[in-house]
Image: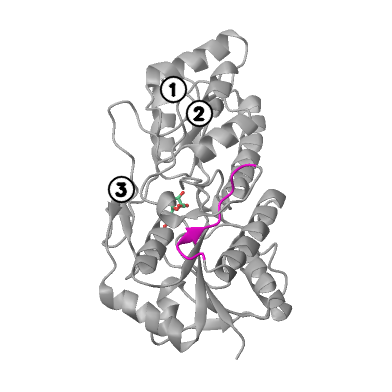
Amino acid sequence: MSERIGIVTGGGDCPGLNAVIRAVAKTAAKRGWDTIGFLGGYEGILEPQRYLELDYNKLGPMLTRGGTILGTANRGRFSAKVGLGEVRRLPQELIEGVKVGLAKLAIRGLVCIGGDGTLTIAQQLFEGGVPVVGVPKTIDNDLEATVLTFGFDSAVACATDALDRLHTTAESHNRVMVLEVMGRYTGWIALYAGIAGGGDVILIPEIPFTYESICAKIEEREKAGKHFTLVVVAEGAREKGGQFKTLAEQAANREVRLGGIAGIVAAEIERRTGKETRACVLGHLQRGGSPTNFDRVLCTMFGAEAVDLIAADRFGEMVSYQGANFAPVKIAEAIGRLKTVPIDGGFVRTARALGISLGD
Ligand code: F6P
């Protein structure tokens, strides 16, 4: 039997998952290895096993295809993250189940594609003796130890396109438009899309806002003859001294669902300024569809590098984008701490230099 490697995709989906799967299957095949893709996240490794044999010649167009052909899960038995900073240990019997499942298929290494939650599980499996390597995925870009995660650029492209569209209607109607974007507890998507799409006010979790500051910006624009304003708000943004806005009660074994802040901000802006204001929640559009060109390249390089890590027996490591270079890092360096927007870093400084209000 030829050598085999396995792949799992876990957590929320995003553009580029299939591009990574393709790159892994293709580069593994070049080494003469077969690739097994487990279905439904880590659960597919356990009995009754569920997997696909990924013969890349029969896979069809994977580079551009959104979602993940393997399916994914962000709840259930393999949930290690349940809230901000809360980590749960996997029961030993699950770790043993994964070992047995991989041994049964003679898998020499498992590529775990995911964000903080999936990689926290990967790290626990590694500590339990499972040969894993990581690939950093999330539209939120909140993973440490990599400059970028794949999926982020595609989400920013979607949010920027939404802002471009809101711009023209805001201007026609002399309105304030509030766009809510994802990003969980970080403001990367809001900040990048806000800068790329000409936002006037960008509200991020890292910088709590006041309504006085937001409305002052709107008034300033009015005085300058600009009778419309674009506000970008990250789902995790909150008023100074305020709470995160959540959509529902937290279910067991699930992360808190953030959302709904745009409606609140829009209503308060209208109440204070008297200007007609509308809210738009972009939601899961940011997670669907084809990856951008940049993400396709990033995914392809990540997939190929992951296979190299397995070939070199560098288990417990994650491929990582370091600007000009790709260099593996320990999975443990990537998890446990969110990579937040540095509040005195280049992106925030640029926004301020342009006169963009950050609501503080
Ligand atoms: O982590 C990715 C993400 O899309 C976050 O930006 C968002 O808060 C969350 O997942 C949404 O999760 P769900 O798909 O469970 O609604």
Residue at x 33%, y 74% (from the top left corner): 95
- Foreground disc of the pair 3, 1: 3
Residues under numbered marks 2 and 1 in contact, where contact means CB atoms less than 8 Å apart: yes
Indicate the position of residue 326 as horizontal and vertical percent values. 62, 50
Reading the image, the residue beneath label 2 is 202
Residue at x 44%, y 22% (from the top left corner): 359
- Foreground disc of the pair 2, 3: 3
Marking on residue 85? 3
Q: Quadrant of the N terminus?
A: bottom right
- The span shown in magenta is 314-323
First of labels 2, 1 by sequence position? 2
Indicate the position of residue 273 as horizontal and vertical percent values. 44, 17
Work out how far the residue at label 3 is from the one at label 1, CA to CA, in angstroms.
26 Å
How is the rendered protein coloured?
one colour
Furthest residue to the front? 312
Majority secondary structure of magenta residues: loop
For the residue labelled by badge 2, is the local secondary structure a helix, a strand or a loop?
Answer: strand
First of labels 3, 1 by sequence position? 3
Task: Check if residue 26 falls in the magenta segment.
Answer: no
Indicate the position of residue 227 as horizontal and vertical percent values. 59, 17
Amino acid under disc 3? Gly
For the residue labelled by badge 1, is the local secondary structure a helix, a strand or a loop?
Answer: loop
Work out how far the residue at label 2 is from the one at label 3, CA to CA, in angstroms.
25 Å
- How crowded is the residue under tag 3: few (<14 C-alpha within 10 Å), some, or many (20+)? few
Marking on residue 359? 1
Amino acid under disc 1? Gly
Residues under numbered marks 2 and 3 in contact, where contact means CB atoms less than 8 Å apart: no
